[in-house]
Image (cartoon, helix red, strand yellow):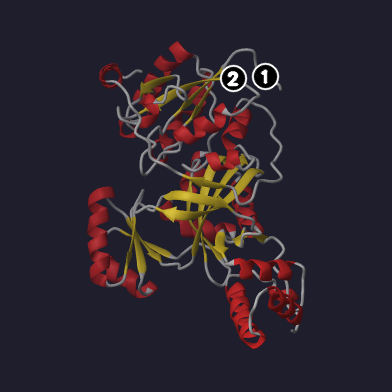
């Protein structure tokens, strides 16, 4: 799973989709997830990295990550063609 | 830096009404003034005394009032000859839909006295008229919403049955009202008829994201510049108050197809609706630069300057890229002037 090629993100968690003109902002955890997605990290790797950095419950975070990713899909931010199984 | 010639180029520009439903004139002038390749003297051509551009002396060197389009071509030509005798105009860039017919008709006569223009042919101009848009799209392989042109209220119900609700009731020149029932459609019909006359266009409603494309054609089928923009903030008059340039080849190809098929000469704006299934419908083709044209200059494709160069006989290569994510946010500003200036333009028709 990775971000679509032309999606612009900032360290502050700002996302700009230049195909649609939509822009979004996320909290710091969201920004970290985006950075990891940009690096084409796998789902387990993202979960591990976030759980190390923040004090979060792994099971709870996995659910939140699912929600977050489905939002990214809805807003055409993820490259679905290159979607790989978790 | 290459000078086109040694003297200032004198360019006359219309549509100085930088109001809440703005004309493109001020934005066109702003873009032209940014060019380092030539020096310009800008002559404003106005219809009313309170068009803000008249009083923007850092942009407009001198303004002359011209007769309303309904006065016809003879009185317009006579006025332009008078202005030309004083100002030695090199080029006129008209920017109002309603005046374009007259300027296109006068194209050759203006050229004979040394005034250039860069306008579409009358046939191109008329082919993209709202009233003929659907047929135009069919001929050129462009998706357009289905429509019916009606001259009588009795035909409204029949048209409504054909398209289902919601449907759009539109005026020949301006205004569009989305309606959900026959009663609403009838109300919209009468409202638009009172303002813009007949015929009325009943159009299939297309739900989607509105995209606008500013394009410039060289008259030989080549697109010199294409810049798509999405409106981020829309006023109650449907005008963009903020917008952003987009990165989507679909729109570039759509505009290229339009310019290639029509051999469009000059600036134009395609109003496009992109449906959720990805299909792009051309809702309207405006035969002149849009009011947000300065964004093309800011994004690296200065369309007004390219038009000036082509109008004066220079070869302009098509632009290859523009800055994506370039935004504009329009603002309102209370320009302060003096009663003497208002009196001068109102009384003498010059300022």
Q: Label 1 crowding class (10 Å Cα cut-off): few <14, some 14-19, many 20+?
A: few
> What mark, if any, has residue B39 been given in the picture?
2
Q: Can residue B290 be seen in this view?
A: yes
- Please report, as a chain letter, where disc 1 is located: B
Give B16 or B124, whichever is nearer the viewer.
Answer: B16
Q: In this view, does B288 lie to the left or right of B158?
A: right
Q: Label 2 crowding class (10 Å Cα cut-off): few <14, some 14-19, many 20+?
A: some
Give B277 or A71, whichever is nearer the viewer.
Answer: A71
Please give the name of the residue rendered at 65% of the width and 84% of the height, measured from the top-left corner: A62
- Callout 2 touching callout 1 (CB < 8 Å): yes
User: Is residue B207 depicted above or below B350 in this figure?
Assistant: below
Please give the name of the residue rendered at 69% of the width and 78% of the height, measured from the top-left corner: A51
Q: Position of residue B191 (x, y in %)?
A: 23, 56
Q: Is mark 1 on a helix, strand or loop?
A: loop
Please give the name of the residue rendered at 65% of the width and 26% of the height, measured from the top-left corner: B313
Residue B331 occupies quadrant: top left
Quadrant location of the C terminus of chain A?
bottom right
- Please report, as a chain letter, where disc 2 is located: B
User: Is residue A68 depicted above or below B9 in this figure?
Assistant: below
């Amino acid at each position: 799973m990775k971000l679509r090629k032309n999606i612009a993100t900032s360290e502050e968690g700002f996302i700009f989709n230049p195909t649609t003109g939509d822009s979004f902002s996320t909290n710091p955890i969201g920004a970290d997830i985006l950075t990891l997605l940009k690096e084409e990290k796998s789902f387990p790797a993202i979960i591990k990295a976030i759980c190390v950095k923040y004090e979060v419950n792994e099971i709870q975070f996995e659910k939140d990550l699912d929600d977050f990713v489905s939002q990214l899909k809805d807003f055409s931010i993820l490259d679905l063609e290159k979607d790989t199984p978790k | 830096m290459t000078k086109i010639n040694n003297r200032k180029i004198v360019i006359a520009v219309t549509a100085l009404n930088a109001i809440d439903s703005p004309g493109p004139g001020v934005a066109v002038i702003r873009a032209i003034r940014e060019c380092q390749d030539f020096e310009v003297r800008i002559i404003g051509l106005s219809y009313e005394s309170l068009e803000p551009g008249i009083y923007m002396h850092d942009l407009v060197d001198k303004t002359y009032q011209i007769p309303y389009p309904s006065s016809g071509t003879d009185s317009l030509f006579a006025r332009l000859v008078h202005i030309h005798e004083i100002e030695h105009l090199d080029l006129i860039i008209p920017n109002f839909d309603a005046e374009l017919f007259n300027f296109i008709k006068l194209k050759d006569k203006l050229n004979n006295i040394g005034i250039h223009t860069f306008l579409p042919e009358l046939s191109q101009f008329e082919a993209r008229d709202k009233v003929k848009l659907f047929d135009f799209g069919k001929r050129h392989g462009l998706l357009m919403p289905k429509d019916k042109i009606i001259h009588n209220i009795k035909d409204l119900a029949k048209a409504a049955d054909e398209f289902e609700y919601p449907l759009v009731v539109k005026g020949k020149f301006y205004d569009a009202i989305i309606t959900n029932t026959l009663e609403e459609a009838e109300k919209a019909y009468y409202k638009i008829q009172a303002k813009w006359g007949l015929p009325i266009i009943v159009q299939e409603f297309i739900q989607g994201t509105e995209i606008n494309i500013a394009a410039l054609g060289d008259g030989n089928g080549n697109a010199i510049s294409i810049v798509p923009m999405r409106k981020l903030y829309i006023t109650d008059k449907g005008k963009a108050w903020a917008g952003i340039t987009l990165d989507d080849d679909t729109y570039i190809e759509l505009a290229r197809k339009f310019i290639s098929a029509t051999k469009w000469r000059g600036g134009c704006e395609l109003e496009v609706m992109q449906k959720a299934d990805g299909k792009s419908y051309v809702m309207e083709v405006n035969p002149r630069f849009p009011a947000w044209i300065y964004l093309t200059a800011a994004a690296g494709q200065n369309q007004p300057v390219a038009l000036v160069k082509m109008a004066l006989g220079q070869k302009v290569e098509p632009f290859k890229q523009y800055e994506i994510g370039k935004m504009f946010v329009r603002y309102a500003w209370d320009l302060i002037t003096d009663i003497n200036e208002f009196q001068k333009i109102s009384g003498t028709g010059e300022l």
